[in-house]
Image: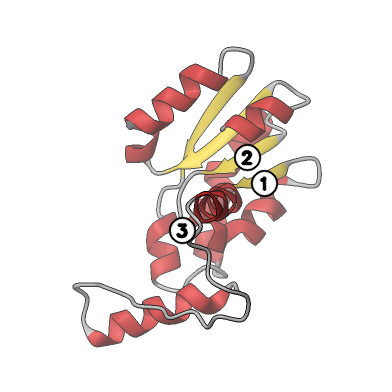
Amino acid sequence: VKPAALTTKSGVIGVLATERSLQGDHFRQAEAKYGAEVTILKGVGEGFVEAVEHNEEHTAKTAELVRKAVLPLVEGGADKIVLGCTHYPFLREEIARVAGEGVEIVDSSEAVARRVATLLDENNIRAEEGAMAEYRFLTFADEKYEQKLREKAFQNR
């Protein structure tokens, strides 16, 4: 919310998130802190999580779900749309298509990555140059679903 609120030209930003996230303390605090000078429109990505988890990002059904969630934000004047869920970057292409050229998509994962890098440096625990990453996935899901998660995790790298 912060980067969108601080850089909006229209004075209106949209936040796409799950209903639970929009009702949560973290969002409410950000809204109170950065929303005083801007209008924050909220959109629930109904069915977005399920679409991503079922590898249905590029279906007509998902395109319709995205259209229903994004158009009200754009029609309300938002020039920035914040992706407020870890699943939503997988739908970024469709969200951007529906939003149109004049709307910037703000992906919070980029800010999280920068913050992690800062904390690693501050605590002198960043891996050495050339170190090989080791990935572990912990889940209660069965082996087949775990493999889907693994593939999805490396899809956008």
Q: Quadrant of residue 13?
A: top right
Left or right of 25, for residue 11: right
Identify the image's colour scheme: rainbow, by chain, secondary structure or one colour.
Answer: secondary structure
Q: Position of residue 52 (x, y in %)?
A: 45, 66
Disc 3 residue type (three-letter)? His
Q: Is residue 83 visible?
A: yes
- Residue position marked by numbered label 2 in the rendering: 81
> In the rendering, which numbered label is found on residue 105?
1
- Residue position marked by numbered label 3 in the rendering: 87
Q: Is residue 76 visible?
A: no
Q: Tell me which label, 2 or 3, sits earlier in the chain.
A: 2
Q: Position of residue 129 (x, y in %)?
A: 63, 75
Mark 2 crowdedness (10 Å alpha carbons): few <14, some 14-19, many ≥20: many
Viewer-proximal residue among 118 and 80: 118
Task: State yes or no: discs 2 and 1 in contact (Cβ < 8 Å).
Answer: yes
Label 3 secondary element? loop
Viewer-proximal residue among 115 and 27: 115
Q: Position of residue 108 (x, y in %)?
A: 56, 47
Q: Position of residue 123 (x, y in %)?
A: 47, 52
